[in-house]
Image (tube, rainbow, N blue to C red):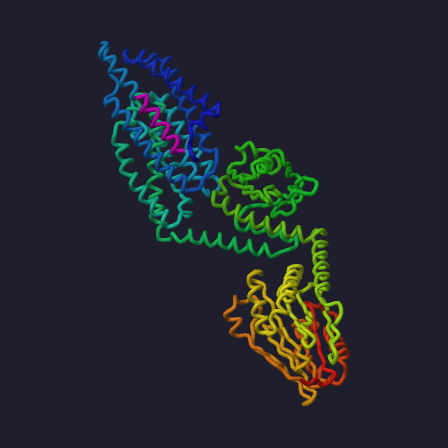
Amino acid sequence: MTFSLRTFFKNKSNFFLIISSSILFFLVFIFDLAFLPQNNFPKNIYWTREGMITVASLLFGLVIYRRHFEEEKNITYKLKTFFFSILGLYLAAVVPSMIFGAGNFSFAKSYIQFLSLLQNNLKNLLLSVFVTVFLIINLFWIRDFVFYKSKRGTHRLFFIAMLFLALSVIYGHYSHKIKETEWLFHGQSPSELILFGSLLFLFTMLSLRTAWVNYLNKRQKILTFWGGVLLLPGAFMFWQTNTLQSISHYSFTLGIFDKGAALFLSIYLVSSIVSLLLHLPTASIFDKRMKEIASLQNLSRVISSVLHYDEVVSRVTSLTQDVLKSDSCWLEMVQENGELKIVSSENLSWQEKKNTPLDRDRGISGWIFKNRASVLVNDVSKDSRTKYLRKHRKNIASILGVPLISQKRVIGILFAVKNEVYGFDQDDREMSNAFANQATVAIENARLLEESLEKERLEQELRVAHDTQMKLLPKEMPKVKGLQIEALCVTAYEVGGDYYDFIRLDEDKLGLVIADVSGKGLSAAFYMAELKGIVNSFARLYYSPKLFLQKVNETLYENVDRKTFVSMIYAIMDFKKGKMTFCRAGHCPVIYYNAKGDTTSILRPDGIGVALDAGNIFNATLEECEIKWHNNDFFFFYTDGLTEARNAKKEEYGEDRVVEIIEAHRHESMEMITRNLTADVIQFIGKSNKHDDLSLVGTKIQEEINE
């Protein structure tokens, strides 16, 4: 909490309380100048003076209380502020005496001694006010530490301790102990011993509440321990000075209160140092806490993998309750009509869900929608944003609300509650914010997938990809004397990037390309279109398949992302010389049937996929192959959708079956070979969905071609 006087005094009520308290202390100062020279206060004046001091101190305390609880801070911030608050207390006990000099009230009646009296009065006023204010501040910090992760009943114990401190003041007044300023610590009567013993017992019991030590890492424990050790000598010196004695002379009420508060502060300081010392060997508990946070992040990734909306929101609330150890948890989401609805909950009855107020404009939900920020309230009954919740669920004591924000708008709120005050801390808040971010992504993804618009968009994309692919493929086979050509492409539901084409280079040469672009859908179709343009541009420039593919690789590598590559075969059929020259860039092999020898060969020259490498490795591994053909020889090209086609048993069709069908129909036309192979693949797949496109190109020599 960054303190700013300008911001502080913008609050008109705070300003009014400060002015009122200052006026009362000024009036007390005037009373002192008027009556102290007489060495006695009239009874009615005495009680009026003590009443004004008490009211002024309470007003200061109210201002400190309101400032203290404006916002929650983590434990390390509180410890640092507590350290400096104690230093401030020590300075408040020393500085007035340094400025005005030592000495108590003087009752001289001369004018010269009146100035000395004025100085002493001012010193005691400043000493009493500043020491009391810093003790009140430190009491609030101790209250925070005592309540941190506290057990039930701790707040009641603290209230009883403060009540006994007030009783000590009242007892001192009405038992004529006004002049005996040390009675609180040196009383002899049974009632005094009981009162002091009870106060000491309560302070000791509260000082044992040091749960915050468990949530410091080892370094923080060491620093806090040595910080406490450094403060101990100051505490000892504080008790050795006449500070508290001077305050008691100034005001019996403040004297008793300050002694009790200083006693509580001293006991808690010693108890904290001892607790830190005992916890140092087990400081690894904080590392365990960090592991829990890491586990939460892992669970967030699991949530992101779930696509069904109802399952996602259910997992969000169940994991939130498990991690925060909350008594109940629920998720409110904005519906299409703009209203809030509880879509998932843990440990929340149907009646409680029905009675829970759902309002985007008021209460804690309204505050979150307005500020788009999480809110932590550790005492529901004292916060105006949450008081109304107690009407519907009386056992709610603390609540944590975190917004789910998507595209700068709140789409929902995740709530966790506990049935005891101070059930959450700043770490819980920060962890919940991180979790809410993951949950938002998961919920939005689930929503998109379940909406019909998304489904329609995906289907439209597939249609566009299919149409693009079909337009890029040749509409008819080239007419070449002495050559049978057959080609087909059977698209899968998820359109891939299969592509084949024929380029007439001159009267005696025909270029043939078959390729498979990695990926699916529209992106694969777009890359296929880009590849077609590159092929048509380079085919008539480079008559060497190897040089051609090297240039294609060089161009494509610079224009595709690193996750995309192309497997490809480029062949040139020379009808004048009766040969085929080709290169294989990571593609499926070529099946070659030699009619003269009645043999089938698998041609698999070396080469890696296009666009996998900038050029050095690609060029070094690419191998060019040349085949002299005979009459009735044929070459068969295909994509991996053929050999990797799967049946219901997840078995692949395989290269061996392809060769078997080709050999069985080797004496038939290329059209019949292609038709029989396609029919066999379809029969093999059965009712299973095709997971990839299936493309094939076959060329068969019809007559002998001589040079």
Between residue 143 and residue 687, name the one nearer to us: 687
Horizontal side of residue 306 vs 85, given as left or right:
right
Quadrant containing the C terminus is bottom right
Report how many numbered discs are placed on residues in the image: 0
Task: Judge whether 544 appears above or below 285 on screen.
Answer: below
> Which residue extends farthest top?
110
> Which residue extends farthest bottom?
597
Quadrant containing the N terminus is top left
Between residue 659 and residue 300, name the one nearer to us: 659
Task: Judge whether 206 appears above or below 491 on screen.
Answer: above
Task: Judge whether 607 appears above or below 450 on screen.
Answer: below
The residue sitting at 42% across, 51% down in the picture is: 286
The residue sitting at 56% across, 66% down in the picture is: 611
Tell me residue 528's x, y (percent): 65, 64
The residue sitting at 55% across, 67% down in the picture is: 612
Q: Is residue 203 magenta?
A: no
Which stretch is magenta? 124-139
Tell me residue 103's x, y (percent): 23, 21
Residue 607 visible to an observer of this rendering: yes
Horizontal side of residue 189 vs 363, given as left or right:
left
Q: Quadrant of residue 557?
A: bottom right
Q: Main secondary structure of the magenta part?
A: helix
Tell me residue 319's x, y (percent): 56, 51
Tell me residue 316's x, y (percent): 59, 50
Horizontal side of residue 426 vs 182, given as left or right:
right
The residue sitting at 74% across, 81% down in the picture is: 482
